[in-house]
Amino acid sequence: MSLTERKLAPGKLNWMIVGSALTFLVACKPAEEAVAPEIRPVRVVTIQSGSGGDSVSLTGRVQAESEVNLAFRIDGRMISRAVSVGDTVTAGQEIARLNPENEENGLRAAEATLQGARGQLIEARANEERNRSLLSQNFISQAAFDRIKQVATSAQAQVDAAQAQVAISRNRLGYTRLLADAGGVVTAVGAEPGEVVQGGRMVVQVARKDG
């Protein structure tokens, strides 16, 4: 075959050039870039200790578990009160005092009555002993001696009654002083100095120390 015959046909040559160009372009295409990951928002919560539930406000009164009302046992005019609300008291401490004039007079009268009864008893006992000797000598009758002896017995009874009255009068005089029976704090007062208070009326209220 001649050189002229070896030349390719024009159409076939064009297709070869186009194919080569496509191959070159494909070879030169850059590699696909990696897709960046999607950024997702994240909510962060800080955990802290706190009181749970709703706050509730209430009104009330704080009261001691054990309270006692201190009062006089007798009537009288209160002349002093040594404590007020909020004061601390101890067992045996004087809280208040009544005017003791009437009770002092009553005690003096009872003591005078006792002295008179004792004098009558001494005289009756001496008379009984004298007449006992006369009875042994038959100078008096048994009936007369029994009457004398009865007088001595009555005198002894009068002495006993007078002694009891003295004890009562002393107690009443002691009742003019109001003492705390236990330690605690004064939470209320019920009478002021100068008032006439009835027996049993609350003078102070004490919250006991153990309550």
Image (spheres, rainbow, N blue to C red):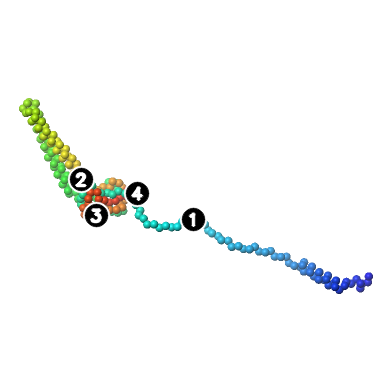
Q: Amino acid at mark 2?
A: Arg
Residue sitting farthest toward the right? 1
Q: CA distance from mark 2 to mark 1?
A: 65 Å
Q: Earlier in the sequence, mark 4 or mark 3?
A: 4
Q: Kindly identify which residue carries mark 3.
A: 192
Instruction: Name the residue rendered at 19%, 43% in the picture.
Output: 168
Badge 2 marks a residue whose secondary structure is helix
**Displayed quadrant of residue 58:** bottom left
Q: Earlier in the sequence, mark 4 or mark 2?
A: 4
Q: Earlier in the sequence, mark 1 or mark 3?
A: 1
Q: Amino acid at mark 4?
A: Glu
Q: CA distance from mark 4 to mark 3?
A: 26 Å
Q: Amino acid at mark 1?
A: Ser
Q: Position of residue 18 (x, y in %)?
A: 81, 71
Q: CA distance from mark 1 to mark 4?
A: 35 Å
Q: CA distance from mark 3 to mark 2?
A: 21 Å
